Amino acid sequence: MNLSRCISPLKKLKNKHNLLLFFTYSTTTTTTTTINANKPTQPSPPPIQVLLTESAGRGVFATRRIGAGDLIHTEKPIVSYPSQSLVHSVCYFCLKRLGNNKDSLQGHSVKFCSNECREQAKGFYEIEERVDWSAYDEHCRKLGLKYPLLVKRLACMVVSGAASAQCLDILQPARLLTQMILEMEDEFSLLKSCLMKANFKDEQMACILFLTKEWYTGVLARIRINAFRIDVAGGSSYEDLFLSAAASVEAEASVGNAVYMLSSFYNHDCDTNAHIIWIENVNARLKALRDIEEGEELRICYIDASMEHNARQNILFEGFGFRCGCNRCLSGD
Ligand SMILES: C[S@@+](CC[C@H](N)C(=O)[O-])C[C@H]1O[C@@H](n2cnc3c(N)ncnc32)[C@H](O)[C@@H]1O
């Protein structure tokens, strides 16, 4: 199975209020509906919908009551990439930590935890292997950049046919300052020159036509707002661990970064009712932190919620471009 099959095909519909409404079909909840004892059970759709909010763009809303601790849905990433310092000690596809090489399949510069992961990575990895990325990787390492590595992987996925060049278009982009755009354009030139030096077949060269400055900066602008830092829970008592969603936060402790579709529509709150956790690998699990009523907006926390008021406001404004007006911030806490 290649990665493109894991991507949520979002279907755009109109609801009875004529608001934009999106359903996702590839995410699942743990509950199943038995229609007939003789028929196989089918996963029920997640109890959520994406609607326009009054002041925060689109957001995720409960379609029924959700209990505290319930799993709301799971989600596979559209694109992910390991932290550069851990590239040889996590699975190159699912980012699972590899202990003493016993979980890894040897013989390649990067490792996979299973044949399934190797198979799913096949599309982009065959392209990636043919390119000398040292200049691009070194540029990212020197400047501590993580998101351009996601763009590199996405570019390889597009060349291999495992993803569409437009697959992130629906996500909200960050507003970019001129200086940022200039830096991104330099990075783009580096990425493109690495790819152009590779020995590709004619049809693959034709596939590189999508690779323009506009594509590169547009993808990076979306990744900046929507990427999650992946902190994988270890040990057996993971169900009790509280791991806040920390989109776009830099940290060496994380196994990597990833972009998801549905999870990207969750807005932020400093006193949140839902959170996202990762158990073993990059597949996300969205869980309710308290009872949530039908129609209530589900929000996650993008940052370290233990920070004081001004620090939270500054990080949210600089990183995500908004002033948080949640009840906790309004109370001055
Ligand atoms: C990951 S996206 C969330 C989904 C987004 N609302 C959309 O329409 O795609 C993050 C962006 O949503 C908006 N946002 C999220 N939480 C917010 C909040 N509490 N108040 C205002 N805007 C918020 C900001 O523009 C932020 O950059």
Image (cartoon, rainbow, N blue to C red):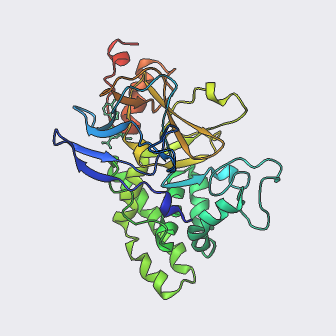
Q: As displayed, is residue 159 above or below residue 19?
A: below
Front position in the image: 157 or 119: 119
Q: Which residue sits at x=36%, y=18%?
A: 329
Which of the image's four quarters has the C terminus?
Answer: top left
Q: Which residue sits at x=36%, y=37%?
A: 48
Q: As displayed, is residue 275 above or below residue 33?
A: above
Q: Which residue sits at x=57%, y=49%?
A: 144
Judged from this view, the residue extending furthest toward the bottom is 202
Q: Identify the image quadrant of residue 185.
A: bottom left
Residue 202 on image: x %, y %: 48, 88
Which of the image's four quarters has the N terminus?
Answer: bottom right
Q: Identify the image quadrant of residue 55.
A: top left
- What is the total number of numbered labels drawn onto the structure image? 0
Q: Quadrant of ligand 1?
A: top left
Q: Identify the image quadrant of residue 125.
A: bottom right
Q: As displayed, is residue 326 above or below residue 99?
A: above
Residue 304 on image: x %, y %: 51, 27
Front position in the image: 202 or 321: 202
Q: Is residue 190 visible?
A: no
Q: Which residue sits at x=63%, y=46%?
A: 281
Residue 228 on image: x %, y %: 50, 43
Residue 253 on image: x %, y %: 65, 39
Q: As displayed, is residue 314 above or below residue 146?
A: above
